[in-house]
């Protein structure tokens, strides 16, 4: 990997550990395979596009990989070399005679025009339709007379069994029973949770609000689950239609679960004084601000990311979550997940920058969409668009609100995919720094009669260190009672690392689709590419450079997924697995399985010359493919 050797505090030892943990052996083998297989241009192009999108140029021999045509990169000639600019390219160049034959004829013209007024790039009418679509959403949030949902009656605030949003009361009894099972605490905390089960029910009910129901079930747990069960208490016969048991949670069962080392029932209402009805009103407002027409970045994606983040948090373990984080921290990052892509226009940051859209101008080309999502979400929550109906923080102090806002801001901005690789490197640096400082303090303060080696201490799981240092019971710490400068520094670094883990977990949840069960991974891949291709079509119409992974004429589905899994997903979850061990057990095997699946689909397409797209496999054929994979894996 091509690492930054000038990074402050980045010693040779820590760079080597970065090399081992992020750039895995399998990842390097994939890189070598792509490098030397000159015939597989589609896979090389897909790898190039993925690395570009995620802040790439991580590999020293990258110029040997990307000799295929690049319609989406801007070029300029300087001193016999061709400079490449775009997301993730920093000072990279290749020889002019290598690259010039690959340049699309009109690229240089487009780049020259891009430096002038936008009217010189595209017709003003086309630009206005793109810009006004986003600007209108932002302007609408500043209107003073935002009304609540018409035609809906607020549920009883004094309901003894917990609050149910009006949308829940509108669905049929059978749908309530099914959703009560789907949204149970046990089911919603699973990595293989299938959000499409809920989506299909809501579509039949003509009451499509997946983000509201997911957010209610997670952020308002466990009272939400109790309210669901009470609402179907008179429909016991309908339980026969559910494929798994719905277990009632009484008060004693709640205490049992909440004291479980592996489970953390949030119970935010009691812990941080928030109101379920106001939370649901906020979720409803946010959900209606998502663009429902987007194939991928819509309210279903937001619901899926919220559930995935919740699952990753539960993987940390109940006792560790209680020791490391204040309830406000957990509440804030879950809330951030609900609006992390709010009002997404269906086009990425590169499109915003090239089309000179209002958000690009407003946010100076810096994390454009992420800044917009954060602005809109926080405007509704605490800004000019705030209303008493969804004033979640009405009982909080200013210090609590500021703490929550900082976490939400950090988490949403952390989903900028162009910062992906630098984010992984920073997490690895922070983890190694805490482990090394912890080992140094213990080596100095503890008696050497214990014969605790530096290697043993420096390799201690970081969650255990965070739990010990940040625990509210300092007497349990093995560190000396006297608080010196090193101990204070360790505590401060542990606090910063804990906050950074929250940031990275939201980002990991945001890109988690390829690491889910194969049927879900396949569904989300199709949605994502559909949206990317729609952007590429618009870019082509507007004479803009076509962004990576957005050209429907050149991007291959299987190849793009293989590259994404090998160069983004696998190293991400390998590093997260170093922090949260359960990730290694529950997620990484699924990543490896999906790589095998997409390789099989790639071979299938090659054998049929692309005439039989695997996207057209029916359910039975899809299951047959998976069964054959299982048999091959067992052999």
Image (cartoon, helix red, strand yellow):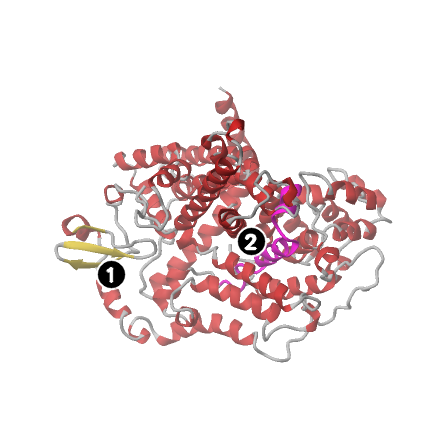
From the viewer's perspective, is 475 left or right of 123?
Answer: right
Q: Which mark is residue 145?
A: none
- Measured in 3D between alpha carbons, the distance from the residue under mark 1 to the one under mark 2, in whole angstroms, is 34 Å
Residue 474 at x, y percent in the picture? 63, 45
Figure quadrant of residue 216 = bottom right
Is label 1 in a helix, a strand or a loop? helix
State the residue position of label 2: 301
Figure quadrant of residue 564 = top left
Query: From which residue to which does the magenta span run?
Result: 318-344
User: Which residue corresponds to the image point at 52% horizontal and 56% vertical from the top-left?
Assistant: 411
Is label 2 in a helix, a strand or a loop? helix
State the residue position of label 1: 107
User: Which residue corresponds to the image point at 49% horizontal and 40% vertical from the top-left?
Assistant: 441
Residue ranking furthest to the left: 80
From the viewer's perspective, is 589 left or right of 279?
Answer: left
For disc 1, the neighbor class at 10 Å (few under 14, some 14 to 19, many from 20) is many
Q: Which residue is nearer to you in this view: 38 or 271?
A: 271
Residue 493 at x, y percent in the picture? 50, 49
């Amino acid at each position: 990997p091509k690492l930054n050797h000038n990074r402050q505090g980045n010693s040779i030892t820590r760079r080597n550990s970065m090399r081992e943990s992020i750039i895995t052996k399998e990842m390097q083998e994939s890189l070598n395979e792509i490098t030397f297989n000159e015939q597989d241009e589609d896979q090389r192009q897909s790898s190039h596009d993925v690395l570009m999108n995620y802040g790439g140029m991580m590999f020293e021999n990258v110029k040997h990989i990307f000799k295929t045509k690049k319609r989406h990169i801007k070029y300029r000639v300087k001193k016999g070399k061709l400079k490449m600019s775009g997301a993730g390219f920093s000072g990279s160049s290749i020889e002019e005679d290598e690259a010039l034959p690959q340049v699309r004829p009109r690229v240089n013209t487009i780049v020259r025009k891009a430096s002038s007024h936008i009217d010189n790039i595209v017709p003003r009418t086309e630009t206005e339709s793109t810009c006004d679509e986003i600007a209108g959403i932002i302007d609408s949030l500043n209107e003073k007379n935002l009304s609540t949902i018409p035609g809906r009656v607020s549920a009883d605030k004094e309901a003894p069994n917990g609050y149910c949003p009006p949308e829940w009361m509108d669905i049929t009894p059978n749908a309530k029973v099914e959703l009560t099972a789907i949204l149970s605490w046990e089911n919603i905390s699973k990595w293989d949770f299938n959000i499409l089960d809920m989506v299909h029910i809501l579509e039949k009910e003509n009451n499509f609000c997946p983000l509201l129901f997911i957010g209610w079930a997670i952020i308002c747990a466990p009272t939400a689950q109790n309210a669901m069960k009470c609402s179907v208490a008179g429909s016991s016969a309908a339980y026969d239609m559910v494929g798994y048991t719905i277990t009632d949670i009484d008060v004693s069962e709640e205490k049992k679960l909440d004291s479980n080392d592996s489970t953390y029932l949030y119970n935010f209402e009691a812990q941080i004084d928030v109101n379920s009805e106001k939370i649901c009103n906020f979720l409803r407002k946010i959900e209606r601000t998502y663009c429902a027409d987007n194939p991928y970045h819509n309210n279903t994606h937001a619901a899926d990311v919220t559930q995935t983040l919740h699952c990753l948090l539960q993987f940390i373990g109940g006792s560790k979550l209680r020791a490391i984080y204040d309830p406000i921290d957990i509440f804030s990052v879950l809330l951030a997940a609900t609006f992390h892509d709010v009002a997404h226009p269906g086009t990425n940051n590169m499109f915003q920058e090239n089309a000179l859209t209002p958000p690009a101008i407003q946010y100076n080309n810096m994390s454009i969409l992420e800044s917009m999502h954060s602005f809109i979400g926080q405007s509704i929550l605490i800004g000019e668009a705030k209303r008493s109906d969804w004033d979640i923080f009405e009982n909080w102090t200013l210090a609590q609100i500021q703490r929550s806002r900082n976490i939400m801001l950090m988490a949403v901005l952390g989903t900028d995919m162009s910062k992906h690789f630098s984010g992984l490197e920073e997490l690895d640096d922070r983890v190694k720094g805490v482990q090394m400082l912890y080992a140094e303090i213990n080596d100095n303060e503890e008696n050497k009669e214990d014969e605790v080696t530096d290697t043993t201490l420096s390799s201690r799981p970081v969650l255990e260190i965070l739990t010990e240092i940040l625990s509210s019971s300092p007497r349990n710490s093995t560190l000396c009672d006297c608080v010196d400068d090193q101990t204070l520094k360790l505590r401060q670094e542990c606090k910063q690392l804990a906050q950074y883990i929250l940031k990275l977990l939201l980002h990991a949840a945001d890109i988690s689709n390829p690491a889910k069960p194969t049927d879900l991974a396949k569904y989300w891949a199709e949605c994502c590419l559909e949206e990317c291709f729609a952007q590429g079509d618009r870019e082509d119409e507007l004479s803009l450079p076509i962004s990576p992974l957005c050209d429907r004429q050149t991007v291959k589905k299987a190849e793009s997924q293989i590259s994404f899994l090998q160069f983004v997903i696998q190293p991400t979850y390998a590093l997260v697995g170093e922090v949260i061990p359960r990730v290694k057990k529950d997620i990484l095997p699924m990543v490896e399985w999906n790589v095998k699946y997409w390789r099989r689909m790639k071979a299938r397409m090659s054998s049929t010359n692309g005439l039989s797209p695997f996207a057209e496999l029916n359910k039975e054929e899809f299951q047959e493919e998976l069964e054959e994979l299982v048999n091959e894996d067992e052999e």
